[in-house]
Image (cartoon, rainbow, N blue to C red):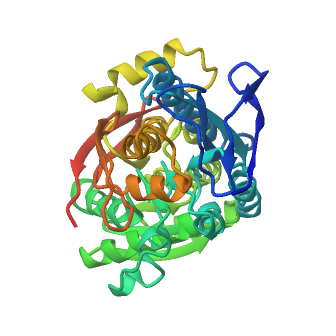
Amino acid sequence: MRHRSLLILTSVLTTGALTLTACGSRDDKGGSDNNASGGDNVTVVIGVDAPLTGSLSALGQGIKNSVDLAVQTANKNKEVPGVTFKIEAFDDQAVPASGQANATKLVGNKDVLGVVGPLNSGVSQQMQGVFASANLAQVSPANTNPALSQGDNWGKGEFKRPFKTYFRTAATDVVQGKFAAQYLFKDAGKKKVFVVDDKQTYGAGLAAIFSDEFKRLGGTVVGTDHVTVKETDFSSTADKVKSSGADSVYFGGQYPEGGLLSDQIKKTGAKIPVMGGDGIYDPAFISASAEANDGDLATSIGYPVEKLPTAKKFIADYNAGGYKDPYAAYGGYSYDAGWAVIQAVKAVVAANNGKLPSDARAKVTEALGKVSFDGVTGKVSFDEFGDTTNKQLTVYKVEGGKWVDVKSDTFNQ
């Protein structure tokens, strides 16, 4: 068996400093001959892929920092004896091709035994196959498109998991879209909605699920339209909304476009709420609108982290960590995704007499499916599709220029 000794140049992302770390000998399958319970310390890298620059960087930085905190905590507590964890973060700028290139780079680093990310479902579609070909586990804290875990025919009731290496700590849009429709129709009392999406995998999929459920409940979709990502003039769509007589708008997309859309709709004189999914649940959605947008709504996965007893330590540690960016909407789910990888590595090492086996990546993927622990966001475990078993969601409303939670519940399909 051919071995090579690795020296890894690692960027300490929170400081920008560089350190040179000597790692043990690994074979070409991503394993290690080092004894993880004694002798030389073994380095295990957890990859991170997210939009670290660009319009969605507020979410991406929160993902990266939260995984970094999980790694720092594991090392401090010696969670896996003999193993030191590090992160290697890549910026995908929310571009699928960049995500695919990053996936190839992560696969090429034999010390990477798990990856957290990405943010966007469309990016993930281009990464999944790359990771699967190398038995490298991926845990997204934010992907919500059902097809990623249940196959393209999930809408027809045909469920087939495309890649065994794919997991997520976020609930799917099947849950989120229906939850939103039920709140808008039953709780908010809206009966005539205009539906807009950004033509992307996440936005179009979420809008379709919402629309189907809204109509099933007895509501009417009075019109539909599409916007283009990174454009800023949505006045034609706003005019269509105004003339349609809609009492509400549902937007499938992200906060940069969503905030501007809300602003331009209200400038037409249509003082109606805009609702969206977790993609618009960010302070930047509010700040993007020059018009007051009190009453706008968003759903997001899980319960408000700040109100979870299980998240108190995470919040305190994050604040003490000196991170310049907030943990944002997916911080808790990112920490839990990173911790799930750490727990899988722990199980693999324990089952192999304190060593990383030669087929460590495959073993970590297998162990992830059995992971179960009390995390920042609640119970963390995965079903047969790699989806989270945590189906908690929250509706937020803009009040006084801030997002305020108005309803949290566990959704049962």
Q: Residue 62: x percent and y percent?
A: 57, 34
The C terminus lies in which quarter of the figure?
A: bottom left
- Which residue is at the front of the view, 32 or 307? 32
Residue 21 seen from this side: yes
Closer to us: 183 or 24: 24
Looking at the image, the residue that sits furthest to the top is 320
Whole-percent x, y for residue 256 in the image: 65, 48
The vertical placement of 174 against 342, above or below, is below
Using the image as rendered, state which of residue 39 and residue 106 is in the foreground. Answer: 39
Q: Is residue 269 left or right of residue 176?
A: right
Horizontal side of residue 119 vs 193, given as left or right = right
- For image coordinates 64% across by 20% down, the residue present is 324
Quadrant in the rendering for residue 150: bottom left
Tell me: 325 left or right of 53. left
Considering the image in quadrants, where does the N terminus appear? bottom right
The percent coordinates of residue 108 (x first, y second) are 74, 54
Give the percent coordinates (x, y) of residue 52: 70, 40
**Residue at (49%, 69%) from the top-left corner?**
148
| Vertical position of residue 370 compared to residue 163: above or below | above
Q: Report how many numbered discs are placed on residues in the image.
A: 0
